[in-house]
Image (cartoon, helix red, strand yellow):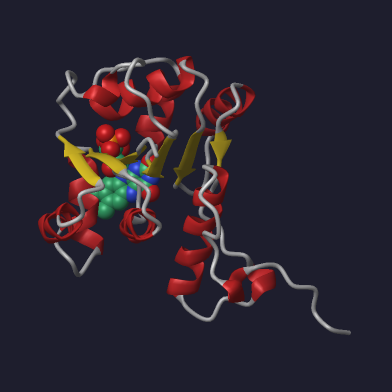
């Protein structure tokens, strides 16, 4: 299978990024990762596992490749390199604005631009609250281009018991949107409540 490109940016929610990469590799999906400087900074603020330790862990998989965010010569910067789509998780409003306006001055933005121009699946997990008109207009522009805007909102109707449930649900939905099968754990799949 072609790799899924994962971009980690400086929105809050590093847990979502950690879970997404873990789950893709556990599902035997190759991952090509790039993380912005702000993505690393927020990760260090939010996570128990240092970013370097996560990279070391993921590198043990032959399915995992990582590129520096300034590495504009990386394969994922070119449309001729085949990929199975791209996930930006979490997606900062900064990166969201750049993608919406076709800016490609770092590897995450360029890879997103390539994903769009090649007509591949692009899934963004934007994180900000409240949202300004600028944020909403950028999201609308992207949605109109076929981008999936998957905001990290809990499925209250599934009665999540923990942050882990919330994270598993959002990541599962994001991976489903990229065509990764069985991404949601059984207990987080929709079931009609008995009367
Ligand atoms: C602890 C922390 C949390 C942040 N959370 C958010 C957030 O939820 N959403 C957002 O758009 N920006 C957030 N930011 C600001 C971004 O990191 C900042 O705009 C940065 O320039 C984004 O760069 P990038 O898009 O290249 O990753 C946060 C910054 C810090 C330090």
Q: What percent of the width, then of the height, locates residue 112? A: 39, 26
Q: Is residue 9 visible?
A: no
Q: On the rendered structure, is 100 left or right of 79? A: right
Q: Quadrant of the N terminus?
A: top left
Give the quadrant of residue 191: bottom right
Q: Residue furthest front?
A: 1
Q: On the rendered structure, is 60 left or right of 80? A: left
Give the quadrant of residue 133: top right
Q: What percent of the width, then of the height, locates residue 41? A: 18, 49
Q: Is residue 4 above or below residue 169?
A: above
Q: Going 19% across and 31% down the picture, which residue do you hit?
A: 69
Circle count: 0
Q: Going 39% across and 30% down the picture, which residue do you hit?
A: 83
Q: What percent of the width, then of the height, locates residue 138? A: 52, 26
Q: Residue furthest bottom?
A: 195
Q: Going 56% across and 50% down the picture, which residue do you hit?
A: 176
Q: Going 39% across and 19% down the picture, which residue do you hit?
A: 114
Q: Is residue 46 visible?
A: yes
Q: Is residue 70 above or below residue 173?
A: above
Q: Quadrant of the C terminus?
A: bottom right
Taking the image as four quarters, which one is ligand 1 found in?
A: top left
4 or 155, which is in the foreground? 4
Q: Residue furthest right?
A: 195
86 or 31, which is in the foreground? 31
157 or 19, which is in the foreground? 19
35 or 184, which is in the foreground? 184
Give the quadrant of residue 182: bottom right
């Amino acid at each position: 299978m072609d790799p899924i490109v994962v971009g980690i940016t400086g929105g809050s929610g590093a847990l979502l990024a950690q879970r997404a990469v873990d789950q893709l590799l556990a599902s035997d999906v190759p991952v090509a990762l790039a993380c912005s400087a702000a993505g690393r900074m927020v990760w260090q603020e939010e996570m128990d596992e240092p970013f370097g330790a996560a990279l070391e862990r993921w590198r043990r998989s032959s399915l995992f490749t990582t590129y520096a965010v300034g590495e504009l010569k990386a394969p994922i910067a070119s449309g001729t390199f085949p990929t199975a789509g791209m996930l930006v998780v979490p997606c900062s409003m900064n990166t969201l604005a750049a993608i919406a306006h076709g800016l490609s001055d770092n590897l995450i933005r360029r890879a997103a631009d390539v994903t769009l121009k090649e007509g591949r699946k692009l899934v963004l997990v934007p994180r900000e609250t409240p949202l300004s008109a600028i944020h909403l207009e950028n999201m609308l522009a992207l949605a109109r281009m076929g981008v999936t805007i998957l905001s990290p909102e809990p499925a209250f109707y599934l009665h999540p018991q923990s942050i882990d449930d919330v994270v598993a649900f959002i990541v599962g939905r994001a991976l489903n949107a990229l065509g990764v099968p069985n991404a949601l754990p059984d207990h987080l799949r929709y079931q009609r409540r008995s009367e």
